[in-house]
Amino acid sequence: MNATAQIAQSPVSVSIGALIERCRSEIATHADRLNGLDCAIGDGDHGTNMLRGFDALLAERELLNALPIDETLVEAGRILVMTIGGASGPLYGTLLIELGRALGSGVVNNEFSSAFQQAVDAVAKRGKSKGGDKTLLDVLYPVADLLDEQHDIEGLPGMAFAFAESTVPLQAMRGRASFLGERSIGHMDPGAASCALLIAAVCRALNEGCRA
Ligand code: ADP
Ligand code: MG
């Protein structure tokens, strides 16, 4: 089944609480690695920041589970802005808030991909950044394109990791890593790495129809 069709069916097959648990667990497992990536080209806190945000989502999972999907996304985005902090908090927060606003109350097949694209554009605007700047946008934009092409959900995690990998040869143009200039080349962007992990976790959860 293609990704957008599967996402459209998700309200019946996957609980928001289970999705939050999966994402939090993925970030917890890889927090040290994300801190390590951020140590190389930033200040070493990206894994810690992300874990703080997903711990906060987990604490609010019952409230988030009870809301309509658009309100869940907006509220989850607000929580991430308040708790992740750093540069990435407002960016991940904007992604979820704008996705919720763009979706409205019903997730209709084919509308998800355009809502996702709108949300990614809002992240770019917020960060004054674009694809190729060595940020999480280097994962979000190509994933948005795959959703638009009705790509199979099974293939998305592997492609998301490949997009994160593709930030290694880039020079950072935004955020702390940009202060390093050419010395930022040769390292994976930590935000791109966390983004790939989260996309993979969400895809796997949707694929398995997890309700835990
Ligand atoms: P901080 O840099 O404030 O310590 P984090 O370490 O949590 O925040 O997040 C760093 C990540 O945020 C980067 O790896 C990059 O992906 C993303 N990022 C930083 N600034 C921008 C920006 N202006 N636009 C898009 N993404 C950005
Ligand atoms: Mg950092």
Image (cartoon, rainbow, N blue to C red):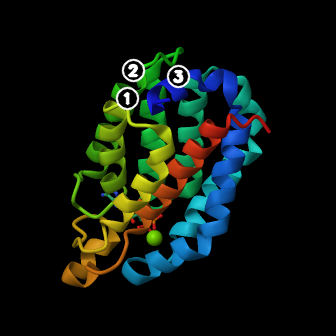
Q: Does 32 sit left or right of 166 as displayed? A: right
Question: Which amino acid type is marked by label 2?
Answer: Asn
Q: Which residue is mark 3?
A: 8
Residue 110 disc label = 2
Disc 1 is placed on an element classified as: helix
Viewer-closest of 91 and 153: 153
Mark 3 crowdedness (10 Å alpha carbons): few <14, some 14-19, many ≥20:
some
Name the residue rendered at 28%, 46% in the picture: 124
Image location (x, y in percent) of residue 211 = 76, 34
* Label 1 sits on residue: 113
Residue visible at 37% across and 30% down in the picture: 150
Real-space Cα distance between discs 2 and 3? 8 Å
Q: Where does residue 131 sit, x and y in percent of width and height? A: 23, 53
Q: Nearer the viewer, residue 195 or 153?
A: 153
Image: 148 above or below 80: above
Q: Quadrant of ligand 1?
A: bottom left
> Residue 185, located in which quarter of the rendered image?
bottom left
Place of residue 11 in the rendered image (x, y in percent of width and height, measured from the top left): 64, 23
In the image, which disc is placed on residue 101? none
Mark 1 Cα-neighbour bin, 10 Å: few <14, some 14–19, many ≥20: many
In this rendering, the answer to whether 115 lies above or below 165 is above
Quarter of the image where the C terminus is located: top right
